[in-house]
Structures are given as C-alpha cells and as structure tokens.
Image (spheres, helix red, strand yellow):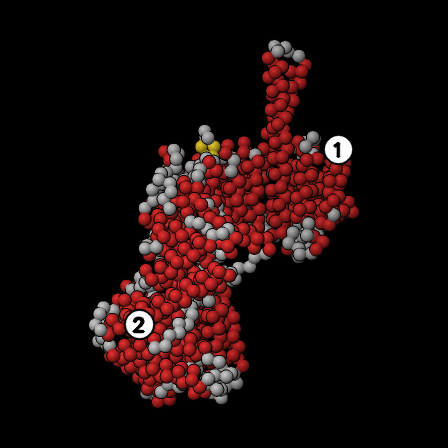
Amino acid sequence: MMPFLQHADIVKYNGRLISHAVRNLVEEYETKKNSVIFQILTMLFEACGARHEIYPEYFQESDVDDVVFSLVDTARKGLVEDNYNSKQKDLKNFKENLVSFWDNLVLECQNGPLFDDILFQKIKDYVIALSCTPPRVYRQVASLVGLQLVTSFISVAKTLSGQRETTQRQLNAEKKKLSDGPLIESLEKRLALTHENITYLEELMRKIFTGLFMHRYRDVDPDIRMSCIRSLGIWVVSYPSLFLQDIYLKYLGWTLNDKNAGVRRASVLALQSLYEVDNNIPCLGLFTERFYKRMIQLADDIDISVAVSAIGLIKQLLRHQLLSDDDLGPLYDLLIDEPPMIRRAIGELVYDHLIAQNIKTSHTGAIDEENESSEVHIGRMLQILREFSEDPILSSYVIDDIWDDMKAMKDWRCMISMLLDENPAIELTDMDLTNLVRMLRASAKKAVGERIVPAIDNRKLYYNKAQKEVLENSKREVTTALLSRYPQLLRKYISDKAKISPLVDVMTLLKLEMYSFKRQEKNFKAAIDLIFDAFFKHGEKDTLRSCIKAIMFCCNECQADLKDYAENKLKNLEDELVLKVKTAIKEVEAGDDEYSLLVNLKRLYELQLSKPVNNDGLFEDMYRILSQLKDMDNEVKSFLLLNMYLQVAWCLHAIDGENPSQESIDELSSKQTSLFHQLYYYLVVLPTYQKEGRSTTVLSCRVCIITAEMWCLFKKSKYSSTKLESLGYLPELDMVQKFWKLCEQQLSISDETEDEDANDEYIDDTNKDAAMIAASKLVLADTVSKAYDRYMTYVHDEENTLIVKAYSECKDLASRLARSYAGVARNKNKSEILKIIHDGVSFAFADLPKQLSFLEAAVLPFVSKLSSSDIPDILADVEKRKSQDTNTNGDQSAWGPYFAFVKELQDRLKDVQEEKEEKPVRRRGRPRKVRDAPGKKLFDGHNSSDEESISASDHQGHGEDDTDDDADQPLINTIRPSASKLRSLKLSQQGTSSQKRAPGPSGSNS
C-alpha cells in the first residue's frame, strides 16, 4: 500500500514531484499494466478522501459498480477526508496539484498507453461513476478530474491535428511526383494512424461529456456547475472542430438562467471568449438568435459582476452586428442606474457603439476611431444628450459614464472652438450649445478630480501623490486652453440664462496663478467684469450662486494685484446691490411694481448665504416695508423675512462671545425682537389666510422654517449663565401651538400638489419636507416638547376618542417620515434609520408597558425601510429586552403592541425566505418592459439523450424578473422621464447601417 499512499501524498503535499512520479508510472506500465492501473485509480480514491480497504485482488475481480458502491458505503460510514474543501495550509495546492497530475499523465501517455484502449477507458469509467455518486466530495473531485481529462485530450488532439495536416501535405506533394513507393505507403499509414488516434480521443471526449458533463452541469453544488461551464467555454474555443456545435453550445445558453450568480457569470465569460474569435461568428447564428434576448436581460442582473460581464458580451455582439439598435432599449436605461460599475460598463458600450462606432465587417475589420476628429465624436455625444436636455442631472450621469472612454471630451480647444462657432462646417442648435457648455463644465470638473454625480457612500475623494500630479496637469491644461478664450465665451453667452451658469462655474476649476505666469491679467480682469455683469443681468438661483462662488473663489485663491481686483469687485457688487434693494423698496412704497424688489432681494439672499452684508438702515428698511405693506406678493414677503433672518444670524456671528460690547448686544436684541414680531404676525394670520396658491404655501413654509431656526438659534438654555444671557429666548406656549398648527397644514399638502410645483427653483427649500425638518430640529434641540409626549397626555385623560385620534396621527406622521427614506436614500442613510429604530425601541422599553405602543405606531414604519439582513438583529434586541424585564407577569394585554411588533418582524423574515426560494434570480432596480414572447425552440431534434432534453421553460424559470416596488428603485429613476427615449436614437453608422440586421423573430427569450 505504500506506493499508493505516496502518490496521493504527492498530490496533496508535494506538487513538484508530480511529473517525476507520473513518468515512473508510465515506464512501469509497459511491464505491469494491472499494477499501474490499480495505483492510479487508488490515487483517485485517495484524492476523493476515501479511507478504503480495496486490494488488488478484489479490484481485479470486481466491476466498476461494485468498487464504487463500496466507496459510497465508506462515505456513508463517515470514513472520508474532505481534501477538496479543506482549509488546511498543507492542502492549499491540492486542486492545482490534482489537475497537474492528470494533465501530466495524459501528456506522458500520448505516445502509447493513451491509445491502448485499456488504461484511459478504465480511468474514464471510474471518473464518470464517481461523479454520479451521492457524496459531494466524490462528485467534486471526479468532476474536476473528468473535466481536466477532456482539456488534456484536446491538447493532444490539437498536436495530432497539426501532425495530420503536415503528413497530408507531404503525401500530396509525393503523389504529385507520380511515384509509388515505400514513402507514400509510410505516409498513408501514418496519416491513417493519426486520424484514428484523433477519432479515438474525440470519442473519449464525447463519452466523458455525456456521462459526466451532462449530469454535473446542473449539479446541486454551484461550484461543480461553474467548473463545468468554465471548462466547456475552454473546450469550444480551443477545439471548435468538435465543440463549436449547437448540441454543445446550448448548455452555455441554458446556464445563463442559473440561479447562482457565479454560474451565470462563468457562462457569460465563456461566451465572451467565444465571440472574440472572428472565425467562430458564422457558426453562432442560430445560437445568437436563440439566446440574445437573455444576454441583454443579464445586463440588468441583480449581481453586479454578472451585469458588467454581460454588458461586455453585448458589446461584442454589437461589434459583429448581431444586434440591432432596437434591441438596445433596456440597456440605455442603465446609463443612469445606481451602481457605478454598471453605469461605467454601459458608458463604455455606448461610446464603442454610438460614438466611436467600432464595427467589424468581413471586408474592413474594425473602424479606426483614431482617424475621426474630436468634432465628430462630440457631435455624436451631443446627439445622445439631446434625449436628456430637459434634465441637467441626467446629462451629468451620461457624461460621467462615457467620460473615461471618450478622449474628445478632454479636447478643450475643440469644445471651445465649437462654442465660439469657429468652424462654419459644424451646425449646432441652441440646445446642442447648452449641452456642450454643460459638457465643458462637467468634463473639466472630472479632469481636476471633482465628482459630477453624487457617490453612493458620500466618501471624500483621496488621491495619492501620482494621482494628484495627474490632476494638477489636467488643471493646467484646462486653464491654458481658457486663458484668452474664457472672456469670449462669457461675453457671447452672458445673456443666455441656460448657458451662463455652467460657464461661470468653470472659473472655480482654473489654476488662477497661471494668469500671472502667462501675463494674462487683462483677460482675468475681463472675466471678473463679465461675471459681475452677469450677476446683475440675471435673477435665477443657479446663476446668482455661480457668480458669487466664482468671485469669492478668486478672492481666496488669487495673489497680489489679481486678489485686490477680485476683492474690490466683490465690494462693488455688495454696495451696488444694497443700493438697488434700497431704491426698489422706495419705489414699491411709492406704488411701483414689485419685480425689481423681488429680483434684488433674491440676489441679496444668495449673497448673504456666503458672506455678511453690512449696511446701516437696510434691516430697518425691510422691517418697515413688511409692516406697512401687507398686500405685497407673498414671495416678496418671503425673501424679506429670509434676508432679515440672515442679517440677524450674521450679526450674532460677529459678536465676541467672551467680551461682547453692550452696543452690539442691544443692536442684535432689537433686530431679534423686530423679526419675531413679523414672524408671529404671520403665525397668527397664515392659518386663516384665504388666498390660495403656491405663493401662500411658500410663505407659510418660510415662516415655519425661519421661526424654528430663530428658536434654535436663541434657545434660552444655550445662553444661560453667559454674557449673552439677555439674548436667550423661550417662546410662549400659545405661539408654539400656532407654530405646530401651521406646520401641520404644510404636512397635509398632497404629493400631487407639490409635484405640480416641481419646477420652482426653490422647491427644495419650501416643500413639506423642509417644514418637517424644521419642526424636527426643534424637537431634537429640546426647544419644544416632543410630539409624542403631547399624545401621551391624552392617554391619561382616558378619553377614548382622543386616544384613538392621537394614536392615528402619530402613526401617520411616522409613516410620512419613513417615506422620506425611499429609493437610494434608504441605502445612503441606513445608519440614520437604524439609529431611529434603536432609539425608538429604547424609548418604548423605558416605561413598561405604558410606552410599548410606540413600537407599533412610530418604529414599525421605519423597519420596512431596512433590508431583510437587518431584521434578525432588531428582532433579537427587542426579544432580549423583553426577557430582561422582571415585570412581565402583569396585564398581558398591555404587551399587545410588543407582540404585534415581533409578529410583523417574523412575518417579514418568513416572506423574504419564501421569496428567495421561489425566485432565486432577481434583477436590480425597476422592472423593464417585456420584450417579445418566446418563439420556436432552437435545438429540436439535436438531443443526444433524454438527459439533454431540457425544455426552454425549465431553464427560463431561473431568469424570471421580479417586479420591485418603487421603493427599490434608485432615486435617480424617480426624478426623470424614462431614459428609454434613447431607444429611438439612430446615429448614422457611416456606411454600415445597411449591413446591420437583427436576429430574426424566431428567437426565443430563454
């Protein structure tokens, strides 16, 4: 038994000796066939981990089934060592060594024993038999060995095929000499023998395929299935003369529906290697027709690695013109999907297919995109961006996806030249120019290392030294291209509100010291002057913020004279703006139109968000007009209150907390009193205000927010026992009640009403979510009592009607708060949701059992926003708290909310488990449109056995798409029209479009 153990030990522990051990076995085989066969097969049994007692005599007398049954019985008794899955350090190379042993054995035997119809027939029989046994480790080892045998047979067959071709050429040459002799006879015998050996190997491959692969490709163990598919992919590519047939290819198509992501990815990668070889394409027509729809579906696979691989496969299909543009509709939706890896992969595909148009033809090969100008690529990119023109956010996503692949987006001079219309041959629409400006800004931000779309995890970007150097060079290139041209761009588009904001933003991306190094101070001053002019030419929020940000950036980043110039310009802007506001106030008081006042109040508000604006009398002027003219437009009132609040906030910020002057305290106290006077007036008036419309809602929301901010800013406890104690403020109870009433009115506004006003530029500041946050801030800061505490007072009153109403209101409020964590927001803010739940559970158990109703009323809506993986921890937490309570023997009915809460958690876990069992393969995000109904079956009549006869419906079940609710959608999907508009995109394919054909309608969606 020692020699047998030695071979097993070599495979387990000492792979360097494998080739020497195999060579000795082959040499010994010439004289001791039965002994060597026994040694080799015993090594196989040892590799399977069986601690058997099979001796040569028994082995010779028994057939394959008897030996395998005894091995299975050994496993049933537990006498098996799992070498295959072992984590022992000594066995880390076991699989590699096992594969090496059998590969070496085949290669060593290729000049004799391989073709004696004894050794490898015996090996084949045992490998197939072991691969079909119940013990998983037997199947794992036998499958690995069997698959490697086929791979090694292919290697030998390819060598023999080369020899056969050489022999055939020599024979043809000799026959042309018209001479018959021993050489021709020798060549004919050699050719016949070589062909016979190749046929013998191919028959061995077929038998292993039929006996092992056809069973194990659907094994319960996903690793075995993965190995089968991976090996089949290698076989088809390396030996297409046998395996590039539909009877083999169909397994790659079927396993695209496997419930395991690793198996699906293995199938996709195998197909990628298959489609990479141009010579394979003519043989793949029927296969592509059958399975192309499933390949497209996998681009939206729930597993990101599968989706990315599938997108790479689709790119290959497009290069070979095996898909039509109409087939790509679902893919364009993924341009703005959430996972960055998916977006990048789709961006690469879009660039390759629609912009660079890399198409392989039978005559010319791939079109060389290097020969095309940047203008051509930018023109195609602008054609894509037309589909997203209405939403700059979506345009940013598309640009971000394609930027890495598209060199033309880094051709700054080309984009600038196109914006300045310097090439008369290029005609751009106004929308194209807007998109080009956005592209210039977004591309410049990417080039200098800034994000243009939000990150999923909100982590700060960090760069190493080499990356920082690259970004610095990119900033230098952007600045060099814009030094003299930037004022021209600003001058041309200064009146265009859609273009001026992104253009002004570019200033913050420049390396400003280069203006001095390159002696371009004149152009810098011209740019600042134009930004100054743009500030007073426009009244939109984005443009105003861009102008202020740009000028302040110059004040902070410039040096010497340029810094002085920028600071003087900012001071002039402030002075001129204050003058305009004061003049507009006087004009309104005189009876003139309010438009000028509104626009300048917006400008003042945006400026005060960044810096204090000091001017004697401005606050008093705003207070006076608010007090005297009650019939002004509500939007004007809103911005007057906002600017007054900012004046108060900056005034407080300027006070020295350690040594405040009495004058500054008195001044701030006066402004504080005046602002509260105005706010309280509207708290009283607005709830009964009869005027309907968006402006009333905006004013109400502004009053709620500013009131909450003021109460927090001057919270009495914050200033007690300090030199600013006189500024501390505690609101009266009646005012708090009026505040809550106005907040409740804002929260009762329907979602439909808010959607109607979604285009309002300040919608994010004045919707009901903003009012809710303002109210929540008061609760968190302990400025007012918690709403739930108010509801608890109703409970003590023992008035059932009030109790039911208060409970219902609390539950409704919690549901609305929980709905704010929808889509990607719940992943982004998962830690906040968990904290809310944890604190809510703690509150519920703080006073048992009185506060347990808080679990059902306020905590449960937030639990629904968590993934199933978080539920067990919450369930364990509440059950642990219950077990630790010593007062559980009282009134059990009071614990009803607790039991309802626990049951809900348990039901959620049960539903998720059932869903996993029934629908193992889901797709990410929202459901896509159903494409076509299944057509005819592809491989009818080609099944080689009953085992192969697997219907399309059997396999299709793994690929069914779940329909997720809106809460599962990425947030970006909820704020845009469908990106499927791109499906109608028809970019000219430069002479190749006429050749493109879709697979016929007979294809089935597998």
Point out residue 953 in the picture as x, y percentages from the top left corner.
42, 47
Front in this rendered view, residue 663 or 674: 663
Point out residue 1003 in the picture as x, y percentages from the top left corner.
39, 40
Front in this rendered view, residue 780 or 429: 429
Q: Identify the image quadrant of the C terminus.
A: top left
Q: Earlier in the sequence, mark 1 or mark 2?
A: 1
Could you give the CA–CA distance between mark 1 and mark 2, rounded to whole angstroms? 110 Å
Point out residue 322 in the picture as x, y percentages from the top left corner.
42, 38
Q: What residue do we see at 37% from left, 46% from top?
A: 420
Is 745 situated above or below 221? below
Point out residue 330 in the picture as x, y percentages from the top left corner.
39, 49
Residue denoted by label 1: 30
Residue denoted by label 2: 582
Q: What residue do we see at 31% from left, 72% from top?
A: 582
Residue at the far top: name it.
178
What amino acid type should be assigned to the residue bearing mark 2? Lys
What amino acid type should be assigned to the residue bearing mark 1? Glu
Number of marks in picture? 2
For label 1, the SS is loop
Q: Quadrant of residue 998?
A: top left
Q: What residue do we see at 47% from left, 59% from top?
A: 562
For label 2, the SS is helix
User: Within 10 Å of the Cα at label 2, are there few (<14), some (14-19), or many (20+) other Cα atoms?
Assistant: some
Rendered image: mark on residue 70: none
Front in this rendered view, residue 311 or 227: 311
